[in-house]
Image (tube, helix red, strand yellow):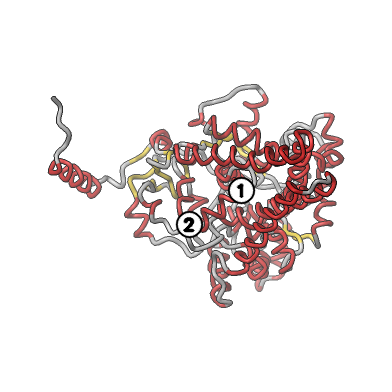
Amino acid sequence: MCKGPTRASAAASVGDAALQDKVIDRDRFISRDELRAHNVPQNAWAAVHGRVISITEFAKRHPGGDIILLAAGKDATILFETYHPRGVPTSLLDKLQVGKMKDGELPSSFYSWNSDFYQTLRTRVVQRLEERNLPRRGGYEIWIKAIFLLVGFWFSLYNMYVRETFWVAALWSVTMGVFAAFIGTCIQHDGNHGAFSTSRGLNKVAGWTLDMIGASGYTWEIQHMLGHHPYTNVLDVDEEERKMAGEDCPMGDKDQESDPDVFSSFPAMRMHPYHTAEWYHQYQHLYAPLLFALMTLAKVFQQDVEVATSQRLYHIDAQCRYGSILNVLRFWSMKVLSVGYMLVLPCYFHGVLGGMALFCLGHFTCGEVLATMFIVNHVIEGVSFGKKGESLGSKDNVEFRPTTVSGITPMEQTRSDAKKAAAGGKVKDVPYNDWAAVQCQTSVNWSSGSYFWNHFSGGLSHQIEHHLFPSICHTNYCHIQDVVESTCLEYGVPYQSERNLFVAYRKMLSHLKFLGNEKKVA
């Protein structure tokens, strides 16, 4: 009969494990396949500037919470750099290191880290926050706003139930949709970025409010934080060519550097100049506002379910979240619960057709508000796009230079202007594909510096600041905006800002019209 381990043998096992930890060869070479094998919360490794670190146990005490597990099985260099504006002690990386990547194992990155532009930005922004005694994460402003929005959402939902006159209930449904949109931009957005509070628990609860309004916080993290934020407006053309040919390749062969927002958010639209313009795209500036209204319905019932069941979002491995049974249980339980109070209960009070109409009306409102504030930040006149892939010419792959839909590189002009203004005509060199510089080239602000519009939009009006500093609470963006803009001017990096949301919206539609009538850019 087999016997279980004794206390002594168990203790010895623990001791052996500790000894093994001490004698780990931290300089051993690790392959891409081995890194990818550690891609679930229970067994997580990540690569940072070529160093491979184990984050499984550290995630339990990580100050930012389990957001660090999004890096599981991936090259997490961009996440590491952008979520730690004060930097990370080298001694901590030394302690967590379990090896280093073999040369050439990871695909060539679109980005360069060979300038001090981003480091200067981080130093100056942190200094501004300290000078004004502003907390980097959280604060009473966002917490008061969160309480107001949550009360408003549930109050509107309750009134939608109990108002017997349908058109009155419909007005409350619209109101509920507006509150849901602002919960998305002003609470869950900061929560899932780890910026709502210094408390791991409060950040988790704030991020969970996206599940509360019907969508999945986990799927949002996969698309937004692993796809859109690190690789804004960048497209892997090799993957696009395979998709157009109806082919797929193993997840291990896919390049993670591609922004899903430019090809997936609105499939009937042409949002990147590399894509082929179909006949119907010439009308996309007319039907785009209608598609915007469908955004949240598509997310809730299609994308969320597909990602949770397939454990992937296009080219992005989603096992860092859905590889945990507890996360999967949260996903399905919140889907059932939210459908209950947002669809089933309205059907009970207003009949099946009335309840479904109210449910859809709330979603149409929420989708329109969210899409309007998001799309103007990256798909608009003057914004740049990037592309990478082996199928491109060697010149494109060497330069990795973002350009507008007209093939112009705005940074050429801003660099020239900076040299003219600088003493001696010298400006510190910033590569066109410097990560922070690319964020400035692919993002656009509106109403820059405005305290009101910053709060109204949940910081989306300061999109450049948000992309550069996603772990800083959005209530701070209006306080650091001038620091970012002046630094961009000093280094000759583009900083585009529109006068207000209405101007930005008009330019977005004009940009869509241009894309819809332009031929594919090779």
From where the camera sits, is residue 390 visible?
A: no
Q: Amino acid at mark 1?
A: Leu
- Seen at 76% across and 36% down, the residue is 351
Q: Residue furthest top?
A: 246
Q: Residues within 10 Å of mark 2 (few under 14, many from 20)?
A: few
Q: Which mark is residue 210?
A: 1
Looking at the image, which is closer to me, 294 or 95? 294
Q: Amino acid at mark 2?
A: Gly
Taking the image as shown, residue 193 lies to the left or right of residue 404, namely left
Looking at the image, which is closer to me, 500 or 370? 370
* Depicted 252 relative to depicted 29: above or below: above
- Seen at 80% across and 46% down, the residue is 164
Taking the image as shown, residue 462 lies to the left or right of residue 519, namely left
* Depicted 500 relative to depicted 366: above or below: below
Looking at the image, which is closer to me, 348 or 389? 348
Q: Quadrant of the N terminus?
A: top left
Q: What residue is disc 2 on?
A: 201
